[in-house]
Image (cartoon, helix red, strand yellow):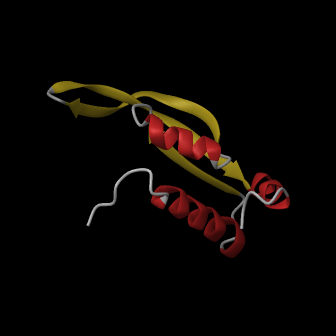
């Protein structure tokens, strides 16, 4: 069953994963990568406190509507102290 975009499921998942990483697993750093064509996800991660660290240029092959090419991956991360600061500001549960 697919859910329509804009319902908040992605944001809820990201928040649960941050909670798991920093609270239960006591991680120092939580990182992810996102394709640069996925602007919606990139904006979500930025709004959830992730910081862009760099790009892996043309590292993923893509085929969109018959056009064959490459997309870049944006590497993003959050540190435990950044998560704790967001918690202090009531931005995290």
Question: Left or right of 17: which side holds 9?
Answer: left
Q: Is residue 54 above or below residue 16?
A: above
Question: Left or right of 31: which side holds 33?
Answer: left
Residue 86 placed where, x, y %? 78, 55
Q: Nearer the viewer, residue 93 or 80?
A: 93
Residue located farthest toward the left when viewing the structure as drawn: 66
- The residue that appears at 45% across and 57% down in the rendered structure is 7
- The residue that appears at 33% across and 60% down in the rendered structure is 3
- The residue that appears at 20% across and 25% down in the rendered structure is 68
Question: Left or right of 26: which side holds 33?
Answer: left
Asked which quadrant contains residue 50, the reply is top right
Residue 69 placed where, x, y %? 26, 24
Q: Nearer the viewer, residue 67 or 2?
A: 2
Residue located farthest toward the bottom when viewing the structure as drawn: 24
Q: Nearer the viewer, residue 45 or 52?
A: 45
Looking at the rendered image, the quarter that the N terminus falls into is bottom left
Asked which quadrant contains residue 53, the reply is top right
Looking at the rendered image, the quarter that the C terminus falls into is bottom right
The number of discs equals: 0
Q: Is residue 17 above or below residue 78?
A: below
- The residue that appears at 60% across and 62% down in the rendered structure is 15
Residue 75 placed where, x, y %? 55, 39
Q: Is residue 48 above or below residue 88?
A: above
């Amino acid at each position: 069953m697919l859910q329509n975009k804009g319902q908040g499921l992605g944001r809820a998942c990201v928040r649960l994963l941050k909670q798991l990483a920093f609270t239960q697993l006591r991680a120092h750093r939580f990182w992810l990568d996102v394709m640069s064509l996925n602007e919606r996800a990139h904006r979500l991660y930025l709004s959830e406190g992730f910081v862009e660290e760099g790009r892996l240029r043309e590292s993923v092959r893509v085929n969109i509507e018959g056009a064959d090419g490459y997309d870049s991956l944006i590497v993003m991360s959050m540190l435990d102290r950044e998560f704790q600061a967001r918690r202090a500001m009531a931005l995290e549960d």
